[in-house]
Image (cartoon, rainbow, N blue to C red):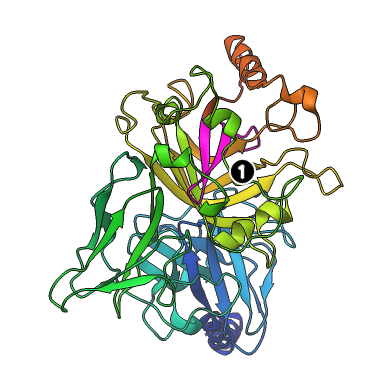
Amino acid sequence: MPFRSTLFALFALCFLPAAASLSGAVFISEFDAINSGIIEDADENQPDWIELRNNGGSSVNLNGWALSDDPADPGKWVFPNVSIAAGQNLLVFASGKNWQIPGLQLHTSFKLDSDGGDVLLSQPDGFGGFTVVHSIQAYPGQRPGISYGYAASNPAGIPGFLQDPTPGAVNDPLVVQDFVKDTDFDVTRGYYSAPFTLHITSATPGATILYTLDGSEPTGTNGTQVPAASELVAPVATIPVTTTTVVRARAIREGLGATNIDTHTYLFAADVLEQDASYVDQPFATWGHSGPDWAMDPRVTGNANPEDKAVPEDFYRIPTVSLVMEWADLFGVSGPGIYIAGEGIPKEASFELINPGADKTDPALSPAEHGRGVALVFGGSSTEKRWKTDKLSFRFNFWQDLDSVVLGDEAVGTYDRLVLDARLNNVWNQSQNFEQRQFGDYARDAVLTDLEQELGVKSVHSQHVHLFLNGLYWGLYTLHERPDNHF
């Protein structure tokens, strides 16, 4: 054997075991194919993500390694010169943006398939190709708010669903392989005028229904529990609904993942017109220019002029949005809630669109729409004039795009975020200037954006809506697209 060949063979024998040892220490610990607001990237997007972990005793340089979602192309996206320290994690966004700059966020050139697929980690094989060092193949369809990976970041186990995603940290100690069947409400969200009995079920025998009526998330320690009569039959929760009620429910069973939380808001328009401070029975921090005001305005509900007096049917004239979240996250004393704390604090919430077609005679004619995500307050000020208006605006970021007809046929119809604009100047809820309140100008912005569209300029679409917060009527808002980099 020539000297050069002999030397190469000896080098390979010495080097390859060490390389294999290093590569075996790095593996795919966790991934999320439906990022439901768990983490955002530098662009404030919520893309898929893949977490690598180094369980070895020394740092591993990943320069030239690759991630892929295709077993036929293991080198699909190649790492730049980055390392992963011993006992540490490295997060890579699977966004399709293809960012490969050391020191900045890493983004693959592909996205993960939420319906199921493969994810592979490879290293160069020395011959211009790649060798797969770890993979999770044929993973099942994914769920919002749930990641997939290894319990306690231990690749010796079987991968499964992680109900508490932990990007950048050691994984939850438990995984599940299947979930309880989703909850089913036999009466859908909407407007009602007569009491009814609501039944909530799950098709999983032996499961337990959990529900709340105060906007909080039902858990094993919060809310009402209704177990199945036996391990062989499905559970049924029976709830009398006699007035405006917010019902949040999920189902659980040992050994299975819990369902997501379903939220249904039932509105009784006649009762809404009677809303006052007695409708609030939970602790709240002070807010507003002169303190909290929960009541309907008697100048509207008790006006002597029949043309100006509000009646239940007035709620059907435009669509209705119901935002529901933990009361403490919204108005709570400790923290405090986002309505008091101000801008830019995301809190998990439910978003319901009731009567999106604005049918004035039958608000149930157009099916209600529902999404989950995070709500943020924006606008206002931290100065002494913070409460120029007691009605603050919201931005809602959906975990999964909302398909909706609410903004009309010419709008895109699919939204990852929407704005609930309370307006500030020249509107009825301006608290600092009486003259501005006389204008009631809720049309100017819509007229201008409509003119822009007629001129061929891209502009936002909008729709006036009634807003309810945890079942409390909050007033007239303008729902519109947000003209940002997502627009």
Q: Residue furthest left?
A: 232
| Horizontal relation, residue 234 to residue 479: left or right | left
Q: Say which quarter of the image contains residue 284.
A: bottom right
Q: Residue at x 53, y 39 (%)?
A: 467
Q: Residue at x 45, y 58 (%)?
A: 33
Answer whether residue 213 is magenta in the image.
Answer: no
* Magenta span: chief secondary structure: strand
Q: Is residue 365 visible?
A: yes
The one nearer the camera, 486 or 122, is: 486
Q: Say which quarter of the image contains residue 230.
A: bottom left
Q: Position of residue 379 (x, y in %)?
A: 73, 41
Answer whether residue 470 is magenta in the image.
Answer: yes
Q: Position of residue 89 (x, y in %)?
A: 61, 75
Image position of 56 with respect to 399: above or below: below
Q: Residue furthest front?
A: 304
Q: Which residues are magenta?
A: 465-487
Q: Position of residue 393 (x, y in %)?
A: 65, 40
Q: Give SS at disc 1.
A: strand
Q: Say which quarter of the image contains residue 285.
A: bottom right
Residue identified by numbered label 1: 395
Q: Is residue 126 visible?
A: no
The one nearer the camera, 134 or 14, is: 134
| Horizontal relation, residue 31 to residue 188: left or right | right
Kindly identify the amino acid type of the residue bearing the numbered disc 1.
Arg
* Quadrant assignment for the C terminus: top right
Image position of 124 with respect to 272: above or below: below
Q: Position of residue 261 (x, y in %)?
A: 39, 60
Image position of 407 with respect to 45: above or below: above
**Marker count (numbered):** 1
Q: Residues within 10 Å of mark 1 (few under 14, many from 20)?
A: many
